[in-house]
Amino acid sequence: MSVYTLIPLLPLMAFLTLTSGGRWWGGASHKVAIPAIGLSFGLSIGAFVEVLSHGPIAIPLYRLIQSGNLIVDLGLYVDQLTALLLLLVTMVSSVVHVYASRYMIGDPRYNRFFAITSLFTFAMLMLVMSRNLLMLYVFWEVMGLCSYLLIAHWAERPAACSAATKAFLVNAVADVGFGFGVILTFVTFGTLDIPQILDQASSASDQTVNLLGWAGGDLHLRSVTLITLCFFTGAMGKSAQIPFHVWLPFAMEAPTPVSALIHAATMVNAGPFLLVRLSPLIVLSPVAMTIIAVIGATTAVFAGVVSLTQSDVKKILAYSTISHIGFMIMTCGVGAFVVAIFHLLAHGFLKGFLFLSTGNALQVVHAHGHTASDSGRDGQAPRLLVAGALTLACLPPFVIFSGPYESLWTVQQFASAKAAFWVIGLITVFCTGMYLFRGMLSLFQQELAVGVPGGEGPVLTRPRLFSSSHFIGVIVGAIVMSCVLVVLWRWFAQFLAPALTRPVASLAESSPMTWPFLRGSGQALWFVVPLVVALSGWGFAYWLHVNPQRSPWRRSERGKTLYVLFLNKVYVDEIYDVYVVQPTLRLAGWLWKTVDLGGIDRVIMSIGGTSVALARWLWHVVDVKGIDRVVVGSGGQTMSVAMWLWRMIDIRGIEKNVERLGDQVDATGHPLHRVEPRTLQHHLLVIVFWLITAIGLFYWFVA
Amino acid sequence: MSSIVADHVLSWMIAVPFLGIAVLVFVRDREWIRRTALAATLLDFGLSLMLWAGFDVGNQGMQFVERMPWMPTFNIQYAVGVDGISLPLVVLTTLLCPLCVLCSWRSINTRVKAFMMLILLVEGAMIVVFTALDVFLFFMLWEVTMIPMYFLIILWGGPNRIAAGIKFILYSLTGSLLLLVAILGLYLEGGRTFDVLALAGHTYSSQAQFWIFLAFFLAFAIKMPMLPFHTWLPDAHSEAPTAGSVVLAGVLLKMGGYGFLRFCLPVFPEASAQFAPFILWLSVAAILYGGYMALAQSDLKKLVAYSSISHMGFVTLGIFVFNHQGIQGAVLQMFNHGVTTGALFLAVGQLYDRTHSRSVHDYGGLHATMPRFVVLLCLFSVASFGLPGTCNFIGEFLVLVGTSSESFVKVLLAMGGIVLAAAYMLWMLQRVAFGRSRTAFAARLPDLNWRETATMIPLVVMVFWIGLYPGPFLDVMDASVSHLVEHVTGTLGLEVSQRSPGP
């Protein structure tokens, strides 16, 4: 057991301590969670350094399953990719925990909150460290459960509960893909060990799967393509890609620190991580890669446009995450895995930061997240906090742009890259510029409204923070940042390469790290163009803010229609509700009423009823009318003989005794009748009837 | 003394519940009746642990065998023994019965003695069913389990108990009848013996195989229950008292699956293979259909009951793919289903004890008033739909891996069933545990007391144990399952479905 086992183990121990301690921890819960995750951050740095100097670390754990030829060994595996993600996850998570220890003060479920966030962190850490696909799948799902519980943290709010259910179910549907991928991988490779699979990937590239074999048809697909698409389906769910993107905006019902965790450290990053982890497998299937790229690109543009129309800061941020992740997926699809990870890290750190500062700002202005609402009723807001949060919040877009910009750069090098992805990338960059600027501006606008005495609604004035001097300062800062990042990037690409090299050897030759920085004019162009596009996005947003009446949304009817369309997120939620959820529920109800109750039950009960009726008829005809009459008749005869005898002999003493006996029989007989209203009799008759049938059948078949 | 116990553990396990009944006859005080019953069931559980400890995992045959002639004229004997397939089910039985006694501690106040006697009777009978090596013994005790269940339903059940009881009896009797026909057929065809092992070694004409298999199949399918024979289950479950539902769902249903594994597969491999495609589709249909049914329910117990049908679909799916993973997964899934569904029925019972309502719409917001209960309910709900890390996941995964060698479409459809399961369980949680209280009483319910919590804890342990470290359970089954698979595939002349790793 290596000391690095403690990286995921510490958050798990925090979780166990907090759950077993129950409410005893109360308001001190963060004192358990923060040191645990902080320590695992420290260990992650250690792991990073060790990977840097000694290469990947493998830690075997125990054997989970051994059944026939299916053997599942659990183990941790820290390579370059994992080391980077460990840093991201533990760092963002510890910051979020520190932040939450203040943010959640006074919450009735303070203890529960920290317990589950610890578990959440643990699940993500295990996910990135998994050596085995099944293990990865386990923590993939555990993470889904944690997000479910955290989104439903304020369980009194029906919206939070349905958001949680929605998140889990959308993920569950997508995870069918993942689970099927795991099984298909086992069938194809005979193992679930990730390094082994990746080693064998190229040799299995010509295997096929017949999809219509069960129906006698013939539809052969390459196993690799199918496996990749299955895993990608899972990734689409976790990373909120079209058409599984609907859960993420609703997940904003969770407390802000949870959003920060979901968007920055855990949940959504799992998708790109999976694609990069399996990159040697994915590159074998151009078809799957094209599909991945198309879906990523569509998501990126779609979410970008939608977030332009939203008025809730948290919704803007949610769609911005979807858009960014879409971008990463697209970069994976065109083969630029290194860029995707770079983007992932940059985005993770910054989005976490953005969420926390938004949370601060929202708390300060006591708004409900609606940027257009008049707020600041609370009087003087702590200006320093707002200003600090917002100034810092201005930086990230630039750093984030450097991600897309770098990726475009690589895309251009990769053979399968198409101009279309290029344009889409630029559109996304433009949209990102616009909506982030808009979001920040609107937040800041609220702060302005505080200053207006009497507060007559939102006052649209020139925002002070974005004066020309600030603007220049921000641009200079961004350029400096970009240069730093470019230097960092070269080192980064070299560092990450070993985790991806095996099958991407051809890719490595053309990858940017072998190119001297900015030597040719072509590279300079690709450096400048995205920056210009992003800046024009900012400029456009600023111009729109100052001249709202010139907005293209407002100028024409079509513009308005489009605006409404995107404001309602293209009605995807409604479409799902009408065409998926409701029909399923209706089908369930219909099946139950018609097939179960009306069909099978009625048939069975009518068989039962018929046999009871038959039995009753038999009883009536044979027993009562036949045998009984004979018996009663003979009994009557006997009685009359007895009567005659009695009259003749007249023994009074005996008569009295008989009377007493009769009374007793009456007394016990009546309650019995009340308890068993003839059912027992009928049951027995049914049993007898069936036995007769049985014996008949038996003689027919056997004897 | 210890050797008397150690040499005859199985017979002692069978005897203890009946001895318990005998002791109960002389106990008058209600509290002592409960204690005696609990002691008897716990003692039995202890004995089953002894059995587990003494079990040799490398041995593929029957262990702890005890034989004694009973009716020599018909070659009927008292013969019991366990192998890796029956051992988990025996342990499951003895694990659930003390919990049944515990959960009825306060909720059963009328005719306590009769109630506890019936529980003990059903426990003893079930242990014999799972260990019998003689078909006649098996059949006799199979019948015996039905009677206590019937009385548990009609005497302590809910408002519609009489109708539910009739339905239960109608279905069960039909099943028993078919079983009787099948067993007599087997006796006549298989060389006039009732010995299970001897019968499995005998070869049968294909026509005899066909008919006897059909009769066995229908009998077990009704007990399971498989798709078109399932309508007794929701009614019986929803009307039975909590302990009855737990026994019914936890153990009685497994008698069907056990029957498939003990009789259908080893004795009639050819007929099994002949029927398998049909049964596999029926299982997939049951998985989906049960899921849809559960989605339409607002009665908590019916919801759990329909989810059982869906889970049992996984069991039959795993059994009839005839490979190692499938069958091992099916046995494990039977155990898991007993744990999770048993726990869910316990949880619903705890609510029912408080409010006497089973409707989803009468609750809501329990997370505030009953936090401990909600944690457990959430845990067992997610375990029930097979969240990775819990026991059902391992079972379902094994079954799906087994099925993948048969057909990918069935795998996909079965996974669709898991999504449905997630949907109805979360839907139920959202309405019962979260949100705001819908009724005045739901806002004032007391949380679980220590006795109720103690009832759930063993099941929590099992959920995580199997979910995270299923090794010991899989090891126990391994030898017997591979023996069975070899027997079946060997008879069929199929290749043992072991894939060579790699391309």
Image (cartoon, coloured by chain):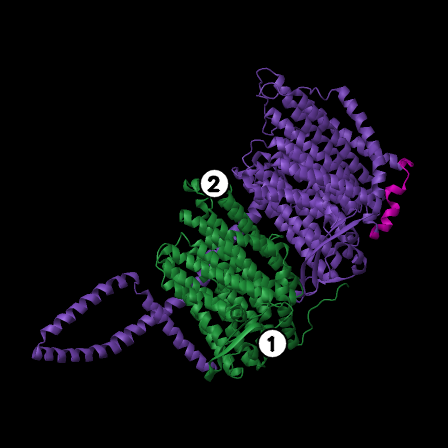
Which residue is depicted at the point 75% across and 33% down?
Answer: A430
Which residue is the extreme one toward the top?
A453
Identify the residue under disc 1: B270
Q: Is residue B419 left or right of residue A199?
A: left
Q: Is residue B381 left or right of residue B115?
A: right
Q: What's under tag 2, amino acid-wise?
A: Thr
Colour chain A appears in: purple
Which corner quadrant of the image does residue A661 belong to? bottom left
Q: Vertically, is A416 above or below A701?
A: above
Q: Vertically, is A546 above or below A519?
A: above
Chain bearing mark 1? B
Q: Position of residue B230 (x, y in %)?
A: 48, 63
Q: How far apart are marks 1 and 2 (CA)?
A: 57 Å
The answer to whether residue A355 of the structure is visible from this angle is yes
Q: Where is residue A7 in the image (x, y as percent from the top left)?
A: 71, 44
The answer to whether residue A295 of the structure is visible from this angle is no
Can residue A517 be found in the magenta stretch?
Answer: yes
- Tell which of A330 and A636 is nearer to you: A636
The residues colored magenta run: A502-521
Which residue is depicted at the point 44% across and 48% down?
Answer: B351
Which residue is depicted at the point 32% across and 68% down?
Answer: A681
Secondary element under disc 1, as helix, strand or loop, is helix
Chain letter corresponding to the colour green: B
Quadrant the C terminus of chain B occupies: bottom right
Q: How crowded is mark 1: few (under 14 residues within 10 Å), some or many (20 or more)?
A: many
Q: What's under tag 1, amino acid-wise?
A: Glu
Q: Position of residue B200 (x, y in %)?
A: 57, 77
Q: Residues within 10 Å of mark 2 (few under 14, many from 20)?
A: some
Q: Is residue A336 left or right of residue B64?
A: right
- Tag shown at residue B369: 2
